[in-house]
């Protein structure tokens, strides 16, 4: 096997590392115009000329090798651990031509680690617009590296970059400057104490707490005793080091870069005077949110109706075409109905993903962070918590991972704990169908009642999140240093391709992720609903016929009575009746109860479960919605889904913690089962109480 | 004066950032002595503050800004 070259993409946040990664590997990792889109290591393979292969690693962005948050730490951990299987043979430092000065700081630090390094200057398409010109030869010579001037947007310079990667052995590993001059005596002592170690590595280890692999720990253990300087002194030295590096960079750029300010244009400041304004900023943010909800409703109703009726006919067609039997019933009643319950929501979910992705790609997200920081701080959150709370409307899992760029552990933990309250797309199916059943159509000021109800539910979710954050902030006794620095990236016209890909990937993940669970659950449910123990189920026909013998019912009605008798006495009916006492006070019947229980795997299962239960034994071609509308409350009469039980259900789903995957991610991010278990018990308990009160008051 | 006293739209030059209350990250983003700083926008209650430091646009909280010493041209 020819040896693969390990290549690490390193650079400041938002410089286009992931875009370069995608260009090199042909993969489609998520790109966005907000510092901190990538929070984990991602890997891919790049084919180079002459049959050489490179193993490319995309890393989270970092401003320097002094980590201040978890995502940044990933980079340092990799670079300090020579035994890591991903330890790079070659570092590709990705920089943004508009912020070259700041980007070079990290570059000079990496050079000190004596790893062969290529400097990629990305976004070259912006140079003319900003009046920037570069003397590449001069820069290559001063920085002791090879430079690739590229633009991933315009697909320029990628082949030259590949060529440079192939010839990485020719790169110089000499540092750009000698950082040890900031305190000669100290560094001399360090060198003497550890003659075999790279001096700059030692310095990095001393100045920060890095989680080392076991083997490396041993080598460096003694360093712990070498902290002869106080924390404050070390920090001052780091400040000195930063200043020294900038001196070198300024001198280099003085000759290597010219910026013609006259031809430079800056839309950012002009836009931000309005978009981050004390009054207008908030107003515009509100209007954006309102528009999104209205659009989700108005734009997706046509494709949704179409999907709903298509699945109903498909199920009917399957029944009529395939030979009669248990398998056909399973397919038509269990699987197709169950899947229809999720496919129907694709339009709305795709629109939601579309808007979030546009917000992320345009650079607006950082402005929201700015606008909300002060308010969020009152609740023990950070402005940066807004991003997980907003992207949590798609799915809580990536949202919880996105908290990794929050510097303070307490703010981060609280954000993780409250994010599952935000209305994720899995709640959307439940909300939409129940809103359609219990909220009247009609409009006020051009906004439909139904859209407003949906928006209200989002606000309730958000309110629950900040409210519980406020409580957690009072209860949790965690001391952690908190500071807040957020970059305001340039506005960018969202790239159609990036947005489309994100929407496609996420929608696909949603449908297939949910699809698998729903498939499994609907098969199990179908069996449980189609079979039952004992006489009551097996002799349903004769029992019912006997019972109504005197009434002379038409055959249709009699059949219906038989089917419902069967369902009541099937396995699922028995289980449902067992839990019914617990949910009756909330206004639900046993079928809803089953749907709620199965929703603890994943919320979106709710509609599919009901669809499966209702379609077992039914002959007619019916859409899910019509079936639900036709359900009758077994005790009170009248529609089962009325205003009171509908609101109660909506509130239950707003608060309950019903998602295994989220619990698993919380466990991973907090490193303990304690927090996810609290979430499960407290959120679901609260949901039950609120739903109970709502039904009892409204009924 | 400190950065926190700067008015919206006003410019100054950073003179001292040696306070240990200033996170290193801020220095690394270019908040260094000699650099020009402009207050682009403030959120309600002047917190956080949106700055343009030598072409880098970033927002920091007031609690950090009070430790950054600057001088304005007409002082
Ligand atoms: N104009 C222009 N924009 C680009 C170019 N390359 C990337 N971008 C944009 O820059 C933004 C950041 O790109 P990413 O690839 O997500 O950057 P990253 O370095 O991976 O960011 P983090 O993972 O957050 O650190 C996106 O909005 C891209 O569309 C380019 O060559 N020209
Ligand atoms: Mg990235």
Image (cartoon, helix red, strand yellow):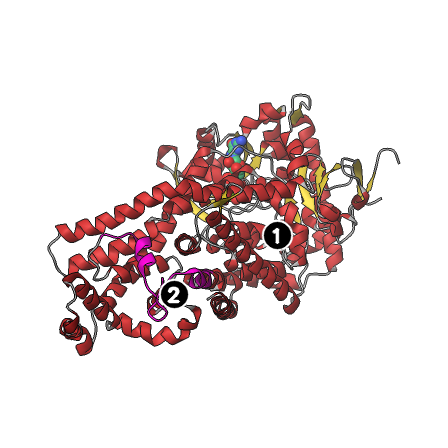
Splitting the image into 4 quarters, where does residue A252 fall? top right
Residue at image point 57% right, 55% down: A70
Image coords of residue A284 (percent x, y): 61, 40
Above or below, A473 against A403 in this view is: below
**Mark 2 beta carbon near ligand 1 (under 8 Å):** no
Q: Residues within 10 Å of mark 1 (few under 14, many from 20)?
A: many
* Of the pair A555 and A426, the residue shown nearer to us: A555
The residue that mark 1 highlights is: A67
Residue at image point 16% right, 57% down: A328
Q: Is residue A91 visible?
A: no
- The quadrant of the image that shows the N terminus of chain A is top left
- Tell me: A696 left or right of B28: left
Above or below, A384 against A699 in this view is: above
Q: Residues within 10 Å of mark 2 (few under 14, many from 20)?
A: many
Q: Is residue A265 visible?
A: yes
Q: Which residues are magenta?
A: A621-650
Whole-number angstrom distance, CA of label 2 to CA of label 1: 44 Å
In the image, is residue A55 part of the stretch drawn in magenta?
no
Above or below, A288 against A125 in this view is: below
The residue that mark 2 highlights is: A596
* Of the pair B39 and A564, the residue shown nearer to us: A564
Helix, strand or loop for disc 1:
loop
């Amino acid at each position: 096997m020819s040896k693969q070259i390990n290549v690490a993409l390193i650079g400041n946040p938002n410089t286009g590392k992931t875009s370069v990664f995608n260009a090199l590997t042909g993969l489609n990792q998520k790109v966005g115009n907000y510092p901190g889109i990538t929070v984990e290591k991602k890997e891919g393979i790049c084919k180079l000329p002459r049959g050489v292969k490179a193993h490319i690693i995309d890393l989270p962005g970092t401003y320097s090798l002094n980590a201040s948050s978890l995502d940044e730490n990933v980079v340092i951990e990799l670079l300090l651990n020579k035994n890591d299987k991903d330890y790079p043979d070659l570092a590709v430092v990705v920089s943004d031509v508009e912020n070259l000065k700041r980007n070079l700081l990290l570059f000079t630090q990496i050079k000190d680690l004596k790893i062969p390094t290529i400097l990629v200057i990305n976004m070259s398409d912006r140079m003319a617009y900003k009046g920037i010109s570069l003397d590449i030869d001069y820069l290559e010579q001063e920085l002791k590296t090879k430079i690739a001037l590229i633009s991933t947007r315009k697909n320029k310079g990628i082949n030259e970059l590949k060529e440079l990667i192939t010839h990485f052995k020719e790169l110089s590993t000499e540092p750009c400057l000698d950082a040890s001059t900031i305190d000669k005596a100290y560094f001399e002592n360090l060198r003497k104490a550890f003659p075999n170690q790279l001096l700059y590595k030692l310095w990095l280890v001393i100045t920060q707490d890095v989680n080392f692999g076991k083997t490396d720990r041993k080598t460096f253990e003694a360093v712990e005793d070498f902290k002869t300087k106080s924390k404050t002194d070390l920090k001052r030295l780091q400040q000195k080091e930063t200043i020294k590096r900038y001196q070198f960079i300024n001198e280099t750029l003085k000759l290597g870069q010219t910026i013609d300010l006259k031809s430079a244009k800056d839309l950012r400041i002009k836009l931000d005077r309005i978009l981050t304004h004390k009054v207008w900023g908030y107003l515009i943010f509100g209007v954006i949110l309102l528009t999104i909800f209205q659009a989700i409703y108005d734009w997706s109703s046509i494709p949704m109706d179409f999907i709903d009726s298509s699945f109903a006919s498909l199920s009917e067609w399957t029944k009529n075409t395939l030979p009669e039997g248990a398998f056909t019933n399973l397919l038509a009643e269990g699987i197709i109905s169950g899947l229809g319950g999720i496919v129907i929501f694709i339009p709305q979910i795709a629109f939601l993903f579309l808007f979030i992705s546009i917000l992320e790609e345009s650079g607006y997200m950082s402005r929201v962070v700015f606008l909300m920081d002060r308010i969020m701080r009152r609740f023990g959150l950070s402005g940066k918590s807004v991003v997980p709370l907003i992207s949590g409307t798609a799915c809580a899992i990536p949202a919880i991972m996105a908290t990794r760029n929050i510097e303070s552990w307490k703010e981060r933990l609280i954000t993780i704990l409250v994010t599952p309250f935000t209305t994720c797309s899995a709640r959307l199916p439940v909300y939409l169908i129940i809103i359609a059943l219990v909220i009247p159509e009609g409009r006020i000021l051009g906004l439909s009642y139904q859209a407003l109800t949906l928006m209200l539910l989002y606000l309730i979710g958000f309110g629950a999140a900040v409210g519980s954050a406020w409580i957690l902030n009072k209860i949790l006794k965690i001391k952690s240093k908190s500071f807040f620095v957020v970059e305001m990236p340039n506005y960018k016209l969202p790239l159609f391709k990036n947005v489309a890909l994100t929407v496609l990937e996420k929608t696909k993940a949603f449908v297939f992720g949910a699809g698998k669970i729903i498939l499994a659950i609907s098969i199990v449910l179908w069996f449980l609903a189609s079979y039952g123990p004992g006489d009551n189920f097996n002799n349903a026909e004769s029992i019912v016929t006997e019972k109504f013998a005197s009434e002379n019912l038409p055959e249709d009605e009699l059949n219906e009575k038989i089917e419902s008798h069967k369902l009541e006495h099937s396995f699922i009916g028995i289980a449902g009746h067992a839990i019914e006492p617990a949910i009756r006070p909330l206004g639900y019947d046993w079928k809803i109860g089953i749907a709620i229980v199965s929703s603890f795997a994943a919320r979106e299962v709710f509609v599919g479960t009901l669809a499966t239960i209702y379609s077992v034994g039914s002959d007619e071609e019916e859409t899910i919605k019509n079936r639900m509308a036709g359900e009758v409350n077994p005790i009170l009469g009248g529609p089962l889904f009325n205003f009171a039980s509908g609101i109660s259900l909506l509130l239950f789903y707003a608060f309950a913690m019903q998602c295994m995957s989220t619990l698993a991610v919380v466990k991973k991010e907090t490193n303990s089962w304690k927090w996810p278990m609290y979430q499960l018990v407290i959120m679901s308990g609260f949901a039950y109480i609120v739903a109970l009160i709502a039904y009892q008051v409204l009924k | 004066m400190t950065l926190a006293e700067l008015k919206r739209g006003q410019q100054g030059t950073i003179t001292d950032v040696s306070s240990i209350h200033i996170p290193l990250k801020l220095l690394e983003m270019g908040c260094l002595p000699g650099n020009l700083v402009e207050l682009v926008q403030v959120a309600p209650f002047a917190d956080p503050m949106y700055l343009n430091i030598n072409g880098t646009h970033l927002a920091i909280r007031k609690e950090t800004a009070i430790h950054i010493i600057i001088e304005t041209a007409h002082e």
